[in-house]
Amino acid sequence: MLLNRKRKTNTLHFYQTLTAVLLIGLWGCNAKHSEVNTNASNDVTAAGEAYLADKGVDSSLWLPVNSVVKRDPNVERQVAKLMADMTLAQKVAQMIQPEIRDITPEDMRKYGFGSFLNGGGAFPNNNKHSTPEDWIALAEAMYQASIDDSMDGSTIPTMWGTDAVHGHNNVIGATLFPHNIGLGAANNPALITEIARVTATEVMVTGIDWVFAPTVATVRDDRWGRTYEGYSEDPDIVKAYASAIVEGLQGTPGDDFLGDNRVISTVKHFVGDGGTQEGDDQGNNVSSESDLYNIHAQGYVSGLAAGSQSVMASFNSWKGDKIHGNKYLLTDVLKRRMGFDGFVVGDWNGHGQVVNCSNESCPQAINAGLDIFMVPTDAWEPLYFNTIEQVKKGIIPMARIDDAVKRILRVKVRAGLFEKPSPKNRPFSGRTELIGHSEHREVAKRAVRESLVLLKNNDDILPLSRNQRILVTGDAADNIGKQSGGWTITWQGTNNVNSEFPGGTSIFDGIRSKVGTTNVELSVDGSYQEKPDVAIVVFGEEPYAEGQGDIAHIDYQGVNGKDEQLLKSLQAQGIPVVSVFITGRPLWVNPEINASNAFVVAWLPGSEGDAVSDLLFKDDNGKSVYDFTGRLSFSWPKDPSQTLLNRGDKYYDPLFAYGYGLDYLHSSSNIPMLSETLQRQATDSDSYPIYQGGVKAPYEMSLFSGQKRVSVKASSLSLAGLSFRTIDRFVQEDGFRIDTQEGEWSGVRFLLSNSEHPSILALNSQYQLKMDVRLLNASAQAIRMNLGCDQAGANCLQSLDLKTQLKDDKEWQTLAVDMGCIDFARFRQQPIAIELASESKVSAMFHNIRLEKSETDSSSADCNG
Ligand code: BGC
Ligand code: BGC
């Protein structure tokens, strides 16, 4: 039996090596590890084989991984010694990871959490402009509280996890690298290691120990809002990169492993996140087990071989089962078969999505193999107490808790957390000159240059001569926030302005520095003072993250999109056009390509926009200094229906295939006019979102209290006695909560100032304003909805009393107000305002505010309020 297994494994090893050799030939990538473990160490023993067979693990598919980080008896002894003295409460605290918006150092002192995180857009003191010193101060305070045993009896250091997913992206001034989709096009694992090393350094400057990267999703359906977080649609690059990045972040044994400028890495999200049906974020992956392994798990094969110490469980389901509760995948496959001996951290209240679980209680997840609950919001407290109770009652076996804590402590010991000085005293801590250091930016610039893909260059219009009049236009030309995408300072990457990227550059900055100020003109809308010889148009997707980036179709801007019009108007004036497309995924842009002489895909280049221009111009000798080396790691669609389009498909018919990319070295033929005659998606006019996982353009959201106003551009905010915070109802930040005080009228306001917007047409009797509401401590009496115009001084708000419709019962309920009962015609030309307001003490939650075609008007609020 044992012999048999070995033979099989060896044969597979041979084929894997062969594939690796082929890969080197094809892509020049460097398959360093022999990932497959022939002398099964770690948890896989002969007895384990019988266990695995019993659990139905296909051992010819899932192979043991040979991690470079070996079990060290000294480490194991130290862990055992620590655990011998720990109470149940201390052990459970190791497994709870709250978020910085929900705990104070005092909570840390009291409970001794094993770790904590800051989510995207969460900053020390809730201050977006926190300095590196502020980050260190919080790291230090949490650390000191964790080793203070005065309340919890524990001296185990905590650790801080952060999403440094394209550089240390929550920190103002950090070097921001291209998002992973661009790095995939660069196809250069050595560069990836360098990027990871730089990222680790900048993270260590702020005293943080651990990053939630790399994402090793193999992305199959580009409607997925996280497409740009993946390197490729194909497992080859994902596999080559996962080990490269883990080595850069953590170092390797013998070479600064988890040393002073290294951080713990996390391969995420295990497993199948990039393969959900319709690209639905957190949705269902129905792949066969062999696709799950061969397509979706390859980043784990190499990332774990390189020694990644943590794995994040994914939000998605596999064949209908949420991974957070899937014992087969988390325990039998990942830990037992692959032999992973670090810890599995959950994703953002992901445990709450397991059947029969809530954010506050989920023994199923621990029993399935989850070691750390990522539990933002105030759910951490009930979760902690419930978990302790569940162990006492035998619902969670003590052995499972011990296994989880052993894994957590093993990683802490390996990372030297018991020996390293406290965060503020570590060698890199406070060396703020390293944040955004010019050498780091050079690495990022190189990555930008290597990531650009040239799709079209008719009549060799590129590279451009610098001695001509250049118009730079498009709304991404001078917009560092837009070129950086999601996970940039804020979670969604929205609400950032250029001054919040000190040291960073826009694409326009680079062009201006190449051609000089007199030859270049910048205008967002394409107007100009003097007719240009050529226009560089920089345009593309607005930033988004996670499910908020999910789209229904991949037609870029719909019929007569605004950028298509801009390009066509330049074309009609006889101005040659070079398009630079900012995007998190391939999109159907045939009309935009047709209206361009050259078309460059820049993906989401990050803070070093100036490097884009390095590829666009000739030098004084008429030669290009840099050439395009980026090649598509995602297939480009020919048709907006090609949402599932991947190398190796049976009927593969892309516009530009995987691996495509033009350059200056090779001559290329002109791209002919592409078909634009496809049935293009009409906008859905049955429903207009106002607040859905954030305020929806063109609405603007603000808080008001009496005459004071502040626009909502953060996940928590207060104004006078009023406070606002986003909440997670079904998924992250899909709703918000407001707390008002007795006194002046205060609340939230949604403003629509674009009187051309089609949703204006919905302000009539066929539509209802709908929202889900949950009253926490108020009577419905206390809330009013004001609808009408927003003209200063004009008395045109109509007020509705909500008491006839809302119940006081603290449950979620749907409110629907007929738009027919408001006389909008009176102020058609004015900005339209929708307000939720109170002049007494109210706590209420809101979710999914929208205008919707009504089915019936019977349940709507009293018009005469
Ligand atoms: C939080 C972010 C977090 C994200 C995780 C949001 O609700 O505000 O901080 O990173 O969820 O998905
Ligand atoms: C995301 C993770 C991230 C976590 C913490 C989650 O919503 O899925 O990728 O690491 O939030 O911000």
Image: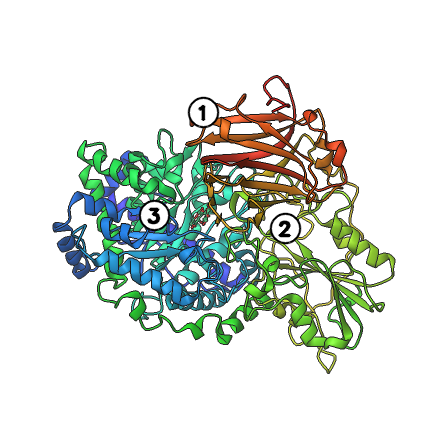
Q: Tell me if 408 is positioned left or right of 597 in this view.
A: left
Q: Quadrant of residue 604?
A: bottom right
Q: Which mark is residue 98?
A: 3
| Cα–Cα gap, marks 3 and 1 | 31 Å
Give the mark nearest the N terminus, 3 or 1: 3
For the point 46% across and 55% down, which residue is it?
Answer: 19
| Cα–Cα gap, marks 2 and 1 | 48 Å
Q: Tell me if 8 is positioned left or right of 315 in this view.
A: left
Kindly report which numbered mark, 2 or 3, lies closer to the viewer in this rendering: 3
Which secondary structure, mark 1? Answer: loop
Amino acid on which disc 2 is placed: Pro
Rendered location of residue 639, percent (x, y):
70, 43
Residue topped by disc 2: 586
Q: Quadrant of residue 349?
A: top left
Q: Mark 1 Cα within 10 Å, few/some/many (few <14, many 20+)? A: some
Q: Which mark is residue 808?
A: 1
Q: Looking at the image, do the residues carrying marks 2 and 3 touch, with CB atoms under 8 Å apart? A: no
Amino acid on which disc 3 is placed: Pro
Visible residue check, residue 275: yes
**Of residues 166 and 219, the one drawn nearer to the viewer in this rendering:** 166
| Cα–Cα gap, marks 2 and 3 | 36 Å
Q: Tell me if 72 is positioned left or right of 678 in this view.
A: left
Q: Tell me if 744 is positioned left or right of 655 in this view.
A: left
Rendered location of residue 140, percent (x, y):
30, 63
Rendered location of residue 279, percent (x, y):
55, 40
For the point 56% across and 68% down, which residue is it?
Answer: 504
